[in-house]
Amino acid sequence: MPGAGEDERVSTAPSEPPTPTPRRDAWRDRAANELVAKMRRTRRHPRPTQFDYLHVRRLVDDLAAALARVGTGAKDVLDVYCGARPYDDLLPPGATVTGLDVPGNPYGLADVVTDEFLPFPDESFDLVMCIEAFHYVPDPARGAGELWRVLRPGGHALVAVPLVWEYDRTVLEHRYTGPALAALFADWDDVRVVENGGRAVSWATLTGSLAGMLQWNLPDRGVLRHALRPAFTGFYLLVNGAGVALDRAERRFDRSTATLPMNLLLTARRPARELQA
């Protein structure tokens, strides 16, 4: 017969292994939420302490104006390569917004995740937007055709692409001038290309980008980078302040047909009544 102590040990032993606390999953969820919040803030409400403040500020202002012009009344909206979806609040109230992104995107906010470009039935949307991502489409002409296909007659496409910006040597990307981007949509109506900033915005953003590269590649990141953070913040403020002044002067005095915009924003309307072949 076992002794009392042994009986107690047997009776108190767990019948099943304890379930581990999902700390890793909770940490990942928290990190993902923080990443989404940061991306939404920096893309929707940029601060002068950001290296790309002027670029984002001009893009957001022009995007808001474009959506106020072409987005009114849209009921079904497609956001292509939606990322963190920072511009949802600029869309018409009550609209049904479908976000599409590729597998492996870090935000987890897409409604449709696929490598296929626009896997939707014909004439599904009133507005299709692709913000800072159309330059990744391998075949631009086919991409523009797909935007046309999924739009209802009279619907609008809104496309924003960078011009003066870094690229990844391992990834196929395209760059467009204003006329080249407009030419892709030559069969559309009401084609309009807006330049989101000129030389001054490009200068400020590239200067800030260079400083940002130095900041994030400092050795001993836990100490040195933290110690120098106020200096970099002050530098971004200085560059962006100078960029604002130069941008005002450029917009006032520049009369040349030559330009160097940071970004381009196109709006185009699929004809409400299409010509018969």
Image: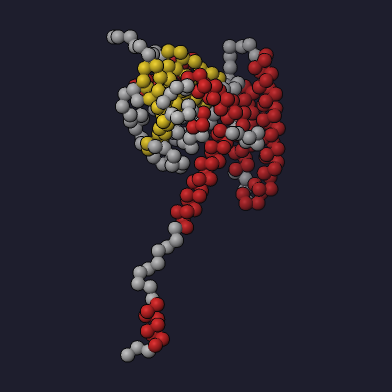
Judged from this view, the residue extending furthest toward the top is 276
Residue under the point 68% across and 39% down: 233
The x and y percentages for residue 102 are 40, 36
Above or below, 260 relative to 277: below
Residue under the point 67% across and 44% down: 229
**Image quarter hosting the C terminus:** top left
Q: Nearer the viewer, residue 5 or 58?
A: 5
Q: How many marks?
A: 0
Residue under the point 57% across and 37% down: 41
Above or below, 109 relative to 145: below
Residue 209 placement, left or right of 7: right
Judged from this view, the residue extending furthest toward the front is 94
Q: Nearer the viewer, residue 191 or 231?
A: 191
The x and y percentages for residue 101 are 41, 35
Write down the quadrant of residue 240 in the picture: top right
Residue under the point 60% across and 43% down: 216
Say if residue 175 shows up in the picture: no
The x and y percentages for residue 176 are 48, 21
